[in-house]
Image (cartoon, rainbow, N blue to C red):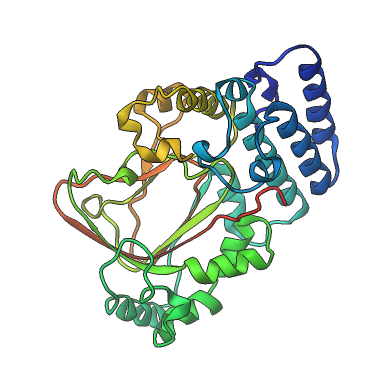
Amino acid sequence: MLDNVLEFCDVSGDIRARLEDIIFNAKSSRTRDDVRDYGRQAFELLAPKASADVLLSSTKDFTRLNCDEHTCRAGIHVIRSYFAHLIRNMHRAETKYRTEYSKEYDEHGIVVVHDFLEDTLRNRVTAEIQKMPEAMMKISSNIISFNTESIALNIMLNESYMKPILFDCLAYTRPEVYDLYAKNTFVQRLRNVPKDGDVQKILHSDTFFPCIKWWYFPDEVKMENGPFVYVPGSHIFTRGRAKFLYEQSIAVATYKLEAARTYGHAEGSLRVFENELSEMGLTEKPYIVPANSLIVANVYGLHRRSEVVTVGHRDSVHGSIRVNTPFV
């Protein structure tokens, strides 16, 4: 994790001295509550016109944070991401690894679990998936916990090794996490069309803090199916990631965005171009996996849906947990 976060804070004099003290005290703190309080002090110092409560929430949309060019140059967005990662790292330091997968997840930002379900349950889950409607997003009929007739899928949701693996990778649990797990796990039956303008095919980060998504693939995923693409190591708050966030927050504030970034960029889901990824010293990787595989990814890390040459289909059990209170 980036140590010298002040490199991306264009402030001087008393403000810089106070910010240096806040950062030092936060790094020395032993409790997450203290770190959050120091975060609030930093936010109020750098963005006095913005709401500290909003800055302490999961709101990622730059346009909703009331941060002008001066505030962005002061480094508010970099400091915000820094504190969110600091708190998540404290969660992990306080929580022992309970599965063999979470350590790999923390190291690379992604982990693949092969042979996830035993054969009988896998066959039942596959049969229930095939009865679901074709849909990319959640709808009432494909959310597993809402669909009591999908017995095998609900067994997978509640009784398989999925929940322990996900919660161990996340590194903390609280009522909000259980609720999001139940509400956000659904059957995704994806139809991938070539050159359809899908913004999810542009490399991006979902938000400014660590959060998690997962896909269970009952069938083999080949290149023609449009596999999940991830950049291993991009989940770490490095100098490269901080520099990119700093530059792009200023670009949003000054209305100097390239059209290719798409609307999601200004909403806080930053799109990354190939040359920018190269500058970070990172490389993307398509995850071609055998049938009965579970992929778990930290989607602060950079990822995308891959392009296809011909129309491809891909079934999965998909879900996400992005908490509303990343500074708690």
Image quarter for residue 30?
top right
Q: Residue at x 57, y 57 (%)?
A: 101
Rendering coords of residue 210 (x, y %): 58, 46
Q: Residue at x 75, y 28 (%)?
A: 45
Rendering coords of residue 324 (x, y %): 61, 55
Residue found at the very far front of the displayed protein: 49
Q: Nearer the viewer, residue 297 or 24?
A: 24
User: Is 103 located above or below residue 237 in the figure?
Assistant: below
Q: Nearer the viewer, residue 109 or 195?
A: 195
Query: Would residue 233 be visible to someone looking at this image?
Result: no
Residue found at the very far top of the displayed protein: 13
Rendering coords of residue 205 (x, y %): 46, 41
Q: Residue at x 40, y 35 (%)?
A: 271
Image quarter for residue 128?
bottom left
Rendering coords of residue 253 (x, y %): 49, 26
Residue found at the very far left of the displayed protein: 310
Left-right relation of 221 to 233:
left
Query: Would residue 124 be visible to someone looking at this image?
Result: yes
User: Is 226 located above or below residue 176 in the figure?
Assistant: above
Total labels drawn? 0
Left-right relation of 77 to 294:
right
Q: Quadrant of the N terminus?
A: top right
User: Is 236 located above or below residue 53 in the figure?
Assistant: above
Left-right relation of 141 to 254:
left
Left-right relation of 122 to 167:
left
